[in-house]
Image: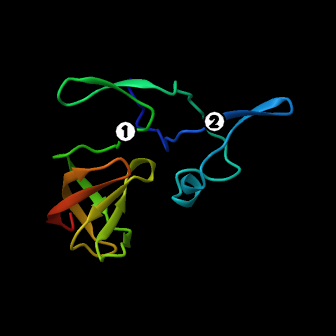
Amino acid sequence: MEISDKLLCLFNAEVREEDDKYIVEVPRREIETGSVDVDEIYRVALISREETVESESGETRTSSEPQPPVETGELRYVEIEDIGKQGDGIARVERGYVIIVPDAEIGERVKVEITEVKSNFAVGEIIEDDF
């Protein structure tokens, strides 16, 4: 499945019926991270709950969770927006996905190599400072 670069966020939600309409609730985190604004109009795409995903090893599996927007070994240019509880830099990319960058300061713009990818965050190592 090809996903547009214009995608603002991706999340799981139930469709529920209310009076004469159907409602899909947007999670609070999508508003808080700035991906979506209240009172704006958006195009919504619905994808079946289970989708087939091919892993790096060529195996096919089913996934109901959105896949991370980065891969191990990928190079990314990011801006550090915040500092985490343990003192690491925090950058956000597509859909508010977090990249943790050790030894980075707020406001720094750095080139990182993704060294670890989890479902809700990744870790990036600084390759180049202030690009």
Name the outermost residue toward the left. 127
Where is residue 65 shown, x and y percent of the image?
Answer: 44, 37
Residue 113, quarter of picture: bottom left
Report crowding for label 1: few under 14, some 14 to 19, many 20 or more residues within 10 A (C-alpha).
Answer: few
Name which residue type carries label 2. Answer: Glu
Q: Which residue is mark 1?
A: 67
Q: Nearer the viewer, residue 91 or 42?
A: 91
Image quadrant occupied by the C terminus:
bottom left
Q: Along the polypeptide, which appears first: circle 2 or circle 1? A: 2
SS under mark 2: loop
Name which residue type carries label 1. Answer: Gln
Name the outermost residue toward the right. 19
Residue under the point 25% across and 58% down: 123
Residue 64 appears left or right of 130: right
Where is residue 105 shown, x and y percent of the image?
Answer: 28, 76
Residue 110, quarter of picture: bottom left
SS under mark 1: loop
Vertical comparison of 115 with 129: above or below: above
Q: Which residue is mark 2?
A: 14
Residue 21 appears left or right of 70: right
Residue 115 appears left or right of 105: left
Residue under the point 33% across and 73% down: 107
Where is residue 126 shown, x and y percent of the image?
Answer: 17, 63
